[in-house]
Amino acid sequence: MSPRVPSTVTIRRTTADDWQQVRDLRLEMLEDTPLAYGETLATGLTHGEAEWRSRGARGQAPHSVLLAAVDDETGEWVGTMGGYLDAPGSPMLVGVYVRPSRRGKEAGVADALLDTVVEWARTEGSALTLHVHEDNPRAVAYYRRRGFEPTGVTVPYVLDPESRELELRLPLA
């Protein structure tokens, strides 16, 4: 039996009508890596359809982006990534998640998502910034591999102000 060849993914912006997939993937990411997000699974479970539709609509909103990586064979959502303007001209990377089965450089899902966010960010500013929990070395290593550098700034983690998030920045020039 030959090894399964990974299927390709399509990266696309989300819509309000994607609310169920947005919800399902968000709840999965909150359970998988709780310290990577500013929301708990318990809170996520309380949101109704209107909140999830609003989140899905972020993919179509001006000055923001919410992307889904969709498996071309199965239609399964295998990753997501977003961006918004923290201030005019200051795009922020947020909501990064790839299903464990699709992680890694060889799978290419995170890179495809990030490439698309970077394209969007270039239309909004000269650098893309993110905050990553200090206890998330896998994520820090990924961002460093992609050219993000620490700025030296740290911020309290919203769910536990005793821990910190590191600020990293990618120049877009």
Image (tube, helix red, strand yellow):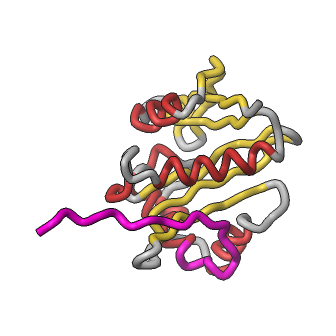
| Residue lying furthest left | 1
Q: Is residue 17 magenta?
A: yes
Residue 115 higher or lower than 144, as above or below: below
Q: Is residue 30 left or right of residue 12?
A: left
Residue at (37, 57) in percent of width and height: 102
The answer to whether residue 70 is above or below residue 117 is below
Q: Is residue 59 left or right of residue 136?
A: right
Specify whether residue 41 is painted magenta: no
Q: Position of residue 89 (x, y in %)?
A: 86, 39
Place of residue 67 in the rendered image (x, y in percent of width and height, measured from the top left): 62, 62
Q: Position of residue 158 (x, y in %)?
A: 60, 41
The residue shown at (68%, 35%) is: 129
Q: Quadrant of the N terminus?
A: bottom left
Q: Of all residues shown, which one is farthest toward the front?
A: 2
15 is higher (above) or lower (below) than 104: below
Q: Position of residue 94 (x, y in %)?
A: 62, 48
For residue 112, above or below residue 9: above
> Considering the image in quadrants, where does the C terminus appear?
top right
Given residues 121 and 163, the one toward you in this image is 121
Q: Measuring 49% from the left and 50% from the top, which residue is drawn there?
A: 110
For the record, the magenta segment spans 1-21
Name, please, the residue furthest toward the right. Answer: 88
Residue pictured at 24% horizontal, 66% vertical: 4
